[in-house]
Amino acid sequence: MRSTFSLRIRLPLPILAVLLAAGTTAACEDDASPTFADDDRLLTRRLETDNITFYFAEGDTVNAAYQQAFHEWAVPYLGISEPQRLRYFKYLGNAHMTELTGQTYGSWADVEGYAIHSVEMQQGHEAIHCYSRAIGWPTDFFTEGIAVALDLNPYTGEDIEFFGAPVHDLCGTWLEAGTLYRLADMLDEEGFWRGRWTQSYPQAGSFVRFLIAGYGLDRFKEMFSAIDDDDSAAAVLSAFEAVYGIRLEEAELLWHEFLRGGDPPP
């Protein structure tokens, strides 16, 4: 899940405790940084790595080493410049997040504020939302698609399974069953959310990963930056064809062949 708005929370008191851990450094709070009151349910703990500042509750924890490793892989891979330190807000659960932020998502990215909000100890998906904003802001099919496609384990390079299975395997099963969504129906905002998000997300991720593997990241970035989030499906189709030199329907058939066991295009 990603959000374009920049969250603003009223935060009256400075951080009263700092967590020190091996491999990390701690720093004093400055006036411009977010702070939370001294309450066990609020985010009183702070931990810093080279590029990320984590905020979490007393007794909770984050996987700082994993998130830093993901950052060190993703930022150079995408070829972006970091606008500022990434902030990671970790909550005890969905109710805790809603209590503090008003949001009901399990995880979401405040891309304008360059921040991740999550109930998870680490988040590759939401980090990609923050990083890819430097490239463009297309419709949800490609915005969520790249976040799913690049949610990889930074230590092994393996993809993070979506509901217990790799996204290509899920899409292969849906293709065989005849229930795979038609891509042209998912390209604008309304179309992407018309189906079940539990299928729309992995479909977008599988197709984006197929495009990157077959045609390269640079070409995908060119298309990603050529589409706006409010573009119509027709505008997205036109941008796709202009960049890839084939119609989306042709690329979709090649993707289907890949899901059946073929190779991505050279």
Image (tube, helix red, strand yellow):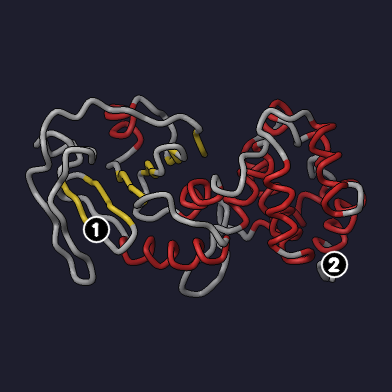
7 sits to left or right of 264: left
Dot 1 or dot 2, earlier in sequence: 1
Which is closer to the viewer, label 1 or label 2? 1
State the quadrant of the C terminus.
bottom right
How would you rate the neighbour count of disc 2 (Cα within 10 Å): few for under 14, some for 14-19, many for 20 or more? few
Point out which mark residue 48 bears: 1
Q: Which residue is mark 2?
A: 265
Disc 2 element: loop
- Looking at the rendered structure, the kind of residue marked 1 is Glu
Residue closest to the eye, 3 or 252: 3
Residue 91's x, y, as percent? 29, 41
| Residue displayed at 65% across by 48% down | 145
- Looking at the rendered structure, the kind of residue marked 2 is Pro
Q: Against 48, is 262 above or below?
A: below
Residue 109's x, y, as percent? 45, 41
Residue closest to the eye, 3 or 175: 3
In this view, which residue lies farthest toward the bottom?
A: 156
Residue 209's x, y, as percent? 69, 59
Residue 30's x, y, as percent? 16, 44
Q: Against 200, is 157 above or below?
A: below
Point out which mark residue 99 bears: none
The Cα–Cα distance between marks 1 and 2, rounded to whole angstroms, is 42 Å
How would you rate the neighbour count of disc 1 (Cα within 10 Å): few for under 14, some for 14-19, many for 20 or more? many
Q: Quadrant of residue 27?
A: bottom left
Q: Against 130, is 79 above or below?
A: below
